[in-house]
Image (tube, rainbow, N blue to C red):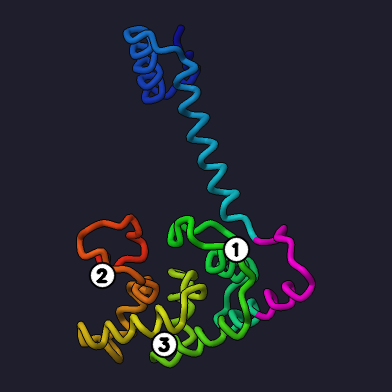
Amino acid sequence: MCFKNTSPDPGKAALSIGLCNVNFLNGVPPSVFRGAWTTEYASKKWELHSTKQIDDVALSSDEKKTWDACKQALSAFKFTVEEEEKMLGKAFGQIHSPYWGEERKKEVPKYEVVNEILDYLRSLSLSDEDLHKLLKKFPEVLGCSLEGELKTNVKVLEKEWGIKGKSLRNLLLRNPKVLGYNIDCKGDCMAQCTRCWVRF
């Protein structure tokens, strides 16, 4: 059995002939190829659903107010409502983010926490325009620990590498994930690469 090509495009015809030869020589049923294509399609479909906005999250009225207050805190940086939803979703486990792996539990952000993080980032000489870029690249920063990660990591950058002031600002715009590093495997991999200093 062979794939039929009705396209006048010679490139597509060659692909079709190639598939026929593989099928004929190896006895591979076309359903195997179809299965592979279906899997690829399903994976793309999953991606689309995984970044879906947080419009169907079951929130109590109080949680909804808190969520909206956090979105309001982000509105200073000229994001769309959809971008604000997605950023908070990624930062607080409502949308899957590879950064967290499987460790992030779903939670509703607290306005005070989001505001403290934004204020701290501003104190690092980051303008609202800078913060727009940083949050776009690394929205998960909003879900990091202010004391345990952000402040600690800024101190590490200053003490170990002498990075502060303008150099720190430039680094954070280039690689904001450094703010969330919380492990140093020292070459002995612990499978938490997205949060490891080895990437620095």
The circle on residue 200 is 2
Q: Classify mark 1: helix, strand or loop.
A: loop
| Circles 2 and 1 in contact, beta carbons < 8 Å | no
Residue in view at x 60 percent, y 63 percent: 106
Tell which tag, 2 or 1, sits nearer the viewer: 1
Residue holding disc 3: 126
Residue 172: quadrant of the picture: bottom left
Q: Is residue 65 magenta?
A: yes
Q: Classify mark 3: helix, strand or loop.
A: loop
Tell me which amino acid carries mark 2: Phe
Q: Position of residue 189 (x, y in %)?
A: 26, 56
Residue holding disc 1: 106
Q: Position of residue 32 (x, y in %)?
A: 45, 19
Q: Position of residue 181 (x, y in %)?
A: 35, 71
Residue 186: quadrant of the picture: bottom left
Tell which tag, 3 or 2, sits nearer the viewer: 2
Q: Say which of 28 and 77 sits in front.
A: 28
Range shown magenta: 54-69
Q: Mark 1 or mark 3: which comes first in sequence?
A: 1
Q: Mark 3 or mark 2: which comes first in sequence?
A: 3
Calculate the distance from the C-alpha at mark 2 to the C-alpha at mark 1: 28 Å
Q: Is residue 199 magenta?
A: no
Q: Say which of 70 and 8 sits in front.
A: 70
Q: Position of residue 125 (x, y in %)?
A: 39, 91
Q: Taking 33 as reference, is 45 above or below it?
A: below
Q: Residues within 10 Å of mark 2 (few under 14, many from 20)?
A: few
The quarter of the rendered structure image containing the C terminus is bottom left
Residue in view at x 34 percent, y 14 percent: 22
Calculate the distance from the C-alpha at mark 1 to the C-alpha at mark 3: 29 Å
